[in-house]
Amino acid sequence: MIFYTFTEQHLRQFTENVFIQMGCPDTDAKLAADVLLRSDLRGIDSHGVARLSGYVRLWEKKRINARPVVKVVHETATTATVDGDSGLGLVVAPFAMKIAIEKARTYGSGWVSVKNSNHFGIAGYHALMAVEQDMIGISMTNASPLVAPTYTTERLLGTNPMCYAFPAGKYPPVVVDMATAAAANGKLEIAQRANTAIPEGWVQDAAGKTSVNPHELKAGGSLLPLGSDKDHGSHKGYGLGATVDILSAVLSGANYGPWVPPFVAFLDPPNDPVGEGIGHFFGAMRVDGFRPAQDFKEHLDNWVARFKSAAPIDQEKPVIIPGEPEYAAEKERKKNGIPLIDAVVDDLNALALKLGIAGLS
Amino acid sequence: MIFYTFTEQHLRQFTENVFIQMGCPDTDAKLAADVLLRSDLRGIDSHGVARLSGYVRLWEKKRINARPVVKVVHETATTATVDGDSGLGLVVAPFAMKIAIEKARTYGSGWVSVKNSNHFGIAGYHALMAVEQDMIGISMTNASPLVAPTYTTERLLGTNPMCYAFPAGKYPPVVVDMATAAAANGKLEIAQRANTAIPEGWVQDAAGKTSVNPHELKAGGSLLPLGSDKDHGSHKGYGLGATVDILSAVLSGANYGPWVPPFVAFLDPPNDPVGEGIGHFFGAMRVDGFRPAQDFKEHLDNWVARFKSAAPIDQEKPVIIPGEPEYAAEKERKKNGIPLIDAVVDDLNALALKLGIAGLS
């Protein structure tokens, strides 16, 4: 595998150009590029520019609307439902999160459920928007069904991530940003490329037996929920995935469970939809709605310091604070650039050729 | 093991009498008994009357205040912090949840963080208070440190449960009520009594190696987070436990992490507290703050029906909807009574003798 390294600015400009060629307004193209770049900067390579062609293919299939009229369709003082008008989730999600933040500014908290959207990038981007305002940020989305709940062979849930982000004082924000499956699809893809066995407990085969074959999903298998099996709490991972699905889609009027449209453009959405597009859920709570922000941050710093200093099992592996590795990656990559594997670079250059814009290099 | 079965009313009266002997006001005694009985009715035997002596021992140590002045110490339109005045969590938690519900009634949502409290029983009780008002209920608490985050040998988190409850239409409410550890302490206790090996992935020994010894916690071992090990996502279980800890305690001013006072009265609380008592967190959101409640319930019914009809791996084990087994147990036990094991009956009769009230049988 060969890596090529690009500056943030170069990749950002390229990404904006792609979205502009799709017909997005300039401000939307900038915002969508910012969400993708933040993912690459934070070291979550699977959710950054590597997905750009995927978005374009959905747009080509008319499943993404490049000029959506995103609007609030239902609300109270602190709750709202947003219709994303089939827009890029990368644009719809920040729109919704801003509403949650504005409501929180006035009333202490704000909560927004979203329908008729598409893939929103990393959950952490949206939750961190609240953290910048000294608020706690919450962000979730449902996704293409790949995960089988405990006891079934059917894929009924996505990897449905949930994110909780908290502002600290001298430390970086604490960001819990996690898929509710046992293993992220990205980890599976690495094993697929290397053609190596995966640990038991990540996937099951079409009959519901645990499997170490990284290609099992292509043969009718499923990802397993966090917990892997009943004895180890897979019903909890399933319960968390269900929670994300209900808050994101049953609450907003989006598609849920097995009706969620697939991210890949070569698979058509179900022809019996139960809602519109995919769904997200966002929340913002003012820290000083509970105690002075300074007190909260000092205690969160103390929490972080205590956990960081915990006795390690292996001296070379200290306890990791949620969000710390991504924060470190962001600092490093802003300085030294973003490495992309050759397959992604080739894919992006082919995309540029197709869209008639300058390639990456 | 011998079981004795008691009517709900008999156990309820007994439990109220115990709390009255502790000096609780009548309404508090009734409420606290209701929380414990609900747990026994719902089949969560570990959190019901089996814990009654534990509460009394904490009261004897003056760690529970039977006549607390519970009050709001900080608030905005939709957020509040409650000081539990060292009261029974069984009383403090419903007080806080009522505030969340009232705020939600007026503004769409309400969120309450609680400090200076004690063990609050089952998280589901409090979340279901919101469901009865056609709201989504959320409930969490931190707890005595027993769980080691990924990569450390130290117990820094409790089993920190989180609960999300949703009102359905023709089906029972969907209630996701789960500890964020791989296995509940109750499961471990069953293996301890039987002296049988436990599955790998539930606990680690004092050196941080996975262990099948059910007595490992007494030898300096720890419970493991949901996910069990890094390969299977234990950092996610750790992240969820951390989220509960921060929302419940760093936000309210309660003790967090290793400073949480132990539930067992024979262990003293740390002598360097970072806050007051233990912490909880509650939320309520009006369903009709997002879409008409009837629409939500119809779609949640459709969600439930689809998941219930999923192809089972084993024909005798259909997919379980979160909250369904507890709902079924409640119906059955209301009718046929609550079975208690002899050890619990003996313990409660000894308690009655000590307090000078009538025993169970």
Image (spheres, coloured by chain):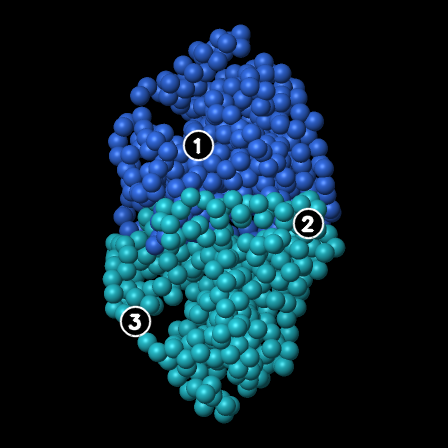
Chain colours: A cyan, B blue
Q: Position of residue B344 (x, y in %)?
A: 41, 19
Badge 2 element: helix
- Residue A151's place in the image compared with B125, above or below, is below
Image quarter (top left, top right, bottom left or bottom right) of the N terminus of chain B: top left
- Say the numbered circle drawn on residue B44: 1
Is disc 1 surrounded by few (<14), some (14 to 19) or many (20+) residues within 10 Å?
some
Say what amino acid the circle numbered 2 marks: Ala
Does any portion of residue B131 appear in the rendered image?
no
Mark 2: few/some/many CA within 10 Å (<14, 14-19, 20+): some
Which residue is disc 3 drawn over? A193
Q: Which mark is residue B356?
A: none
Residue at 66%, 21% in the rendered image? B67
Residues tagged 1 and 3 counted as in contact (Cβ below 8 A)? no
Residue sitting at x 43%, y 65%: A144
Question: Do discs 3 and 2 share a chain?
Answer: yes
Q: Residues within 10 Å of mark 3 (few under 14, many from 20)?
A: few
Dot 2: chain letter = A
State the SS at label 1.
Answer: loop
- Tell me the mark number nearer the camera, choosing from 1 and 3: 3
Total residue callouts: 3
Residue at the disc numbered 2:
A293
Q: The C terminus of chain B appears in which quarter of the rendering?
A: top left
Extreme-front residue of the structure: A315
Discs 1, 2: same chain: no
Q: In the visual, does B240 lie left or right of A295?
A: left
Question: Residue at point 41% right, 73% down?
Answer: A264
Residue at image coords 34%, 68%: A189
Q: Nearer the viewer, residue B286 or A198?
A: A198
Query: Which amino acid type is marked by label 1?
Result: Ile
Secondary structure under the numbered disc 3 in the rendered image: helix
Q: Position of residue B166 (x, y in %)?
A: 54, 46
Query: Residue A293 in the image: x percent, y percent?
Result: 68, 49
